[in-house]
Amino acid sequence: MSSATIVSLPDQSTARIPKTNFITKENGLLSWLLTGDHKRIAILYLISITFFFAIGGSLAGLIRLELLTPQSDLMATDTYNKVFTMHGVIMIFLFLVPSVPATLGNFLIPIMIGAKDLALPKVNLLSWYLYIAGGTLVLYTMMTGGVDTGWTFTTPLSTHYVNTNVLSTGLAIFIAGFSSIFTGLNFIVTIHKMRAPGMTWFRLPLFVWSNYAASILMVLGTPVLAIAIVLVALERTVGIGVFDPTKGGDPLLFQHLFWFYSHPAVYIMILPGMGVISEVISTFSRKRVFGYTAVAFSSVAIAVFGFFVWEHHMFIMGVSNYSTLVFSLLTMLVAVPSAIKIFNWSFTLYKGSITFETPMLYAFGFMGLFTIGGLTGVFLAATGTDIHLTETYFIVAHFHFVMVGGMLMAFLSGIHFWWPKMTGRMYPEKISQLAAVVTFIGFNLTFFPQFILGELGMPRRYASYPEEFQILNVFSTAGATVLGVGYLLPILYLTWSLKYGEIAGSNPWQATGLEWQIQSPPLTENFAEIPIVDHDAYDYEWLEKMELAKKQQEVSSVG
Amino acid sequence: MSDSSTLVQADHAHEHPPYQRHHFETMQQQVDATGFAMWLFLLTEIMFFGGMFTAYLIYRNWYYPAFVAASHQLNIFWGSLNTLILISSSFTMAMGVWSAQMRKQGTLVLCLVLTFILGLGFLGIKTIEYKEKFEKHHVPGAHYSLNSFLNPDSDKEAKDAGDKPLPLDMARHTEIYFSLYFAMTGMHALHMIIGICLLGYMIFRARQGAYTTGHVSFVEYFGLYWHFVDIVWIFLFPLLYLISRHQ
């Protein structure tokens, strides 16, 4: 690692965490459970999603352990089905969808746009309670026998053939879905109506733009998932026939409704992560993000295109060849705005003053892994290759590269980047750099072999496989172990740093966002006085001038 | 001097009425933001119902004769009466919003109570209709009966409409029509029930004078919701009852 650093911490012997801040304002459990403060709700979300991530991660560990050997020996095959289903449900609906928006977005969006809170604080709290209700129902499902349809609830399997807890899982997702609708709705309203004077749309940090795009998807897509689940539930209980082929219903209709949400959902998961990367790349290369407008609009473009590609999940399910052609083309179009982002970040790095703090390491990991994940997406958009690769481990590798290699890296990058702002203390730099590298290595070792396995034809969702695939599966399981260590480390040292971390001061990274111009941790009302914004995002010269002015003022007041 | 200071004070009091939440800079911002949020929420509701309307569109195209025959089973009298009731309830609700804005507490309570009663009336009639379907075994599921469509002469409604017997394969698909009928009107009724519960709460609060002090957002947004639920019915009624009436 380079020894160059931009970190500037206050003198540790005199620095103190500000006495009044949003954490110390009120005490007691109830002051947290009934709070309207977006920062406290973000913390509540952070704790809860970490909890569910740990459960989902342990299930992933069980899956990899089972796949260490070709036979199904660790668990029975139907247990295996339940394990991968619960892994999918928890990771998607309870971790990835709320990960960045509900934690970092909740914490930062009001501050970044210069507002005191989200527009609807009570709705924000309600969304957390809905999340908890959904999560509790998922736990209930797990304890009462689980569900084994896969996270996709494919009909007629989910409506007719399985005898597991489809209903409680469906209800859980329905409820968690409303939590995500309310988060998205709150963000859109806040970004439209609560911006500080002078904070024009094109002065917004790109993190806000990408969360805005994701919110559009949450608001428009999630209700469609809700109705699809309601219809599945009605079919299971009452026996209505909308998806039932024996009554003339069409199971494909379920697929259409389900993927109309669930494809945009992957952009709900990745877009906020892209916002994190924009902030981090700019800060640690001391440059304005190259092509700000293009990056901002590429988020919106991804959101718009994202609604017109869902059928690529159904290429082998008997949809018409002509529509396949159109959807294949539209799917490839999504690669354009994604590539715009990757190229613009690379150009931002070009001739920047790059330093290698942990958030930046994770961001580099994101750029590499997301590029691989994205490009393999183009393989799958091409109908010919898709028929060979679909329902194999190639798919599994592809979406884990995007979701874990992309989103989880971005999430960890963001958590490290804003940790000093949220807690007022630094995380330990050396060990966290180690964790970033371990995560990267572990990730590649886990998921790269799965591309090869898929290409060779190993199907997904089976507990056993032919013996010739074992060597690659052993690599993958070994990688998962490394990856597990990589995720355990941050949980440990971040908790440690709550008490023992160095005092961060208000702007340890010398970053330009409004959130770095206020104390850490922030006041409950964020700003003593609502700022008037007179500069663009990522304007490092403005920051220098401000610092200079502050120093002069100190000198003159001392003099 | 004292004049200007009272002026400033009055101005300050004007800027921060008791119902302005602390995180909004001005009352205008609060009204803008919450109103926008309500419209966005209604947009999510459109997407929610949209899934079922899509299903209706597809299956109506596929199973046209079945949809025609099944729609003849609906009771046009109850349907029209319910439409009338619902439109009237929208009127009373709109009057409620107006009286809240005009700060007429008595009229507001009266309008809310009328809306409440009309809403209950709608649900009552819906229950009668559901009961008819239940008795004729037109509720999808294990006890679904094809009799009205295979032997239309044995069925009063089918006979009155002059239905021809459907082939078994097509008659089967009337169950899809009734699936959609129950799913769509059921979801609509659920929204009515939620609305009626909220109305009950609002009547209680309105009697305490909560909405007639100048802050009418809640009544106004509830009005939007109530009109939205009406509009859904305005689409459901022709699609389910009327569109194939004379075929």
Image (cartoon, grey):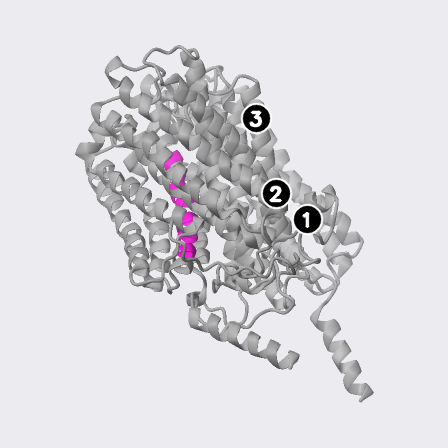
Q: Is residue B82 left or right of residue A19?
A: left
Q: Chain of mark 3?
A: A
Q: CA distance from mark 1 to mark 2?
A: 10 Å
Disc 3 residue type? Leu
Which mark's residue is nearer the viewer, 2 or 3? Answer: 2
Question: Badge 3, how many Cα within 10 Å: few under 14, some, many 20+?
Answer: some
- In the displayed orientation, state which residue is furthest to the bottom: B1
Q: From where the camera sits, is residue B20 visible?
A: yes
Q: Chain of mark 1?
A: A
Q: Which residues are magenta?
A: A258-280
Vertical side of A162 occupied by A220: above or below: below
Tell me which label, 1 or 3, sits earlier in the chain: 1
Q: Which mark is residue A44?
A: 2
Residue at (56, 50) in percent of width and height: B227
The residue labelled by disc 3 is A139
Q: Nearer the viewer, residue A253 or A375?
A: A375
Vertical side of A477 occupied by A181: above or below: below
The residue labelled by disc 1 is A35
Do the residues indicated by labels 1 and 3 lie within the same chain of the protein? Answer: yes
Q: CA distance from mark 2 to mark 3?
A: 18 Å
Residue A272 painted magenta: yes
Secondary element at image label 1: loop
Question: Residue B119's spot in the image, x, y percent?
Answer: 64, 42
Disc 1 residue type? Thr
Residue at (32, 31) in percent of width and height: A445
C-beta proximity under 8 Å, tags 1 and 2: yes
Question: Residue B10's spot in the image, x, y percent?
Answer: 76, 77
Q: Chain of mark 2?
A: A
Q: CA distance from mark 1 to mark 3?
A: 25 Å
